[in-house]
Image (cartoon, rainbow, N blue to C red):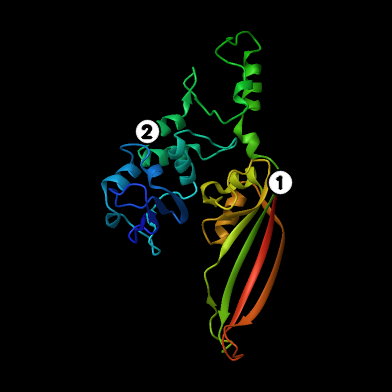
């Protein structure tokens, strides 16, 4: 009969010689994963293999709930775990985090996975991206040399067609939402005690949001969203509105509308206690 292993949290019935449970809970950058011990040690000499075969549970870091803790990107770890299950790499059709996933593969010492994610080099020594669907449709510049009086015109047309700056000039709207609260004491002259802002949300077309906010955009609530689709579930990794406004201004957006709501409540049933004000504001930005 399999016995419960209090050191590892769940049951232990796979290998009596291993100090680890058959089912293991992981906390990777705040994201919780549950997997089998055999999955984590599927690739010999990898980081996870060394952690869960060469060490004991007491030697590994844990969070407050006893889960094994890894201070890495919790969103990208889902693809690391998928690869370990059958040693095959399957990514969404639109996956802009390929270079970051390669970095995670290198950290976890998954050499074969890192090679699969390594950018391919074309004949002219330029980096190609297999995810881009338009690559196969582009004519090869090295196949037919450009000569004659029309050469400069042809090059100009080609550079205009594939210039990334055209993509960055797309018009559209981005809505920034801001939720916060503060406390005002019984003495109205007392300075307001501002509390930490809960979150700055970003709504709009995915491609525009990623163009403006880049790595500061947290996509964990709505991953793998195609670039031409809209989302209302993104939020920023910082809590200052001015940072968001500076970014939007830098990319040519200007504010066209604003709306705000607020509520007031008491911190307790005593009306003489501090009042807590909660507000939610939305700012609409446009680039024409």
The answer to which quarter of the image holds residue 40 is: top left
Tell me residue 264's x, y (percent).
65, 79
Which residue does the image show at 33% across and 56% down from the upper left? 61
Rendered position, 233 above or below 140 = below
Left or right of 45: which side holds 271? Answer: right
Asked if the residue under mark 1 is in contact with the one under mark 2, i.e. CB atoms within 8 Å, the reply is: no
The Cα–Cα distance between marks 2 and 1, rounded to whole angstroms, is: 41 Å
Expressed as whole percent of the image width and height from the top left, the position of residue 175 reads 67, 55
Residue at x 59% of width, y 30% of height: 132
Residue beneath the point at 62% across and 13% down: 151
Along the viewing direction, whichever of 254 and 227 lies nearer the viewer: 227
Residue 147's disc number: none
- Does 275 appear above or below 2? below
Q: Nearer the viewer, residue 135 or 258?
A: 135
User: Looking at the image, is mark 2 or mark 1 earlier in the sequence?
Assistant: 2
Q: Which residue is mark 2?
A: 111
Count neighbours of disc 1 (C-alpha within 10 A) and say few if under 14, some if 14 to 19, many if 20 or more: few
Q: Is residue 124 above or below residue 45?
A: above
The residue labelled by disc 1 is 172
Q: Which of label 2 and label 1 is nearer to you?
A: 2
Q: Position of residue 277 (x, y in %)?
A: 62, 77
């Amino acid at each position: 009969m399999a016995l419960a292993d209090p050191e590892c949290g769940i049951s232990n019935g796979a290998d009596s010689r291993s100090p680890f449970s058959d089912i293991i809970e992981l906390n990777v950058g705040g994201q919780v994963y549950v997997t089998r011990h055999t999955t984590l040690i599927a690739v010999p000499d990898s980081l996870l293999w060394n952690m869960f075969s060469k060490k004991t549970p007491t030697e590994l870091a844990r969070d407050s709930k006893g889960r094994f803790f890894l201070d890495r990107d919790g969103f990208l770890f889902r693809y690391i775990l998928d690869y370990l299950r059958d040693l095959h790499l399957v990514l969404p059709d639109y996956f802009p985090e390929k270079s970051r996933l390669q970095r995670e593969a290198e950290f976890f010492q998954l050499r074969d996975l890192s090679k699969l994610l390594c950018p391919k080099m074309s004949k002219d020594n330029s980096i190609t991206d297999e995810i881009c669907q338009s690559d196969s449709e582009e004519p090869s510049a090295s196949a037919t040399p450009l000569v004659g009086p029309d050469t400069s015109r042809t090059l100009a047309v080609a550079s205009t067609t594939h210039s990334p700056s055209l993509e960055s000039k797309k018009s559209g709207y981005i809505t920034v939402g801001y939720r916060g609260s503060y406390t005002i004491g019984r003495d109205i002259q007392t300075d307001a005690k501002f509390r930490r802002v809960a979150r700055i949300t970003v709504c709009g077309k995915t491609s525009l949001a990623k163009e403006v906010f880049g790595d500061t955009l947290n996509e964990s609530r709505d991953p793998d969203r195609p670039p031409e689709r809209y989302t209302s579930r993104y939020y920023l990794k910082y809590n200052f509105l001015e940072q968001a406004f500076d970014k939007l201004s830098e990319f040519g957006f200007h504010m066209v509308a604003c709306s705000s709501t607020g509520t007031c409540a008491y911190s307790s049933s005593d009306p003489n206690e501090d009042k807590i004000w909660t507000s939610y504001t939305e700012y609409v930005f446009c680039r024409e």
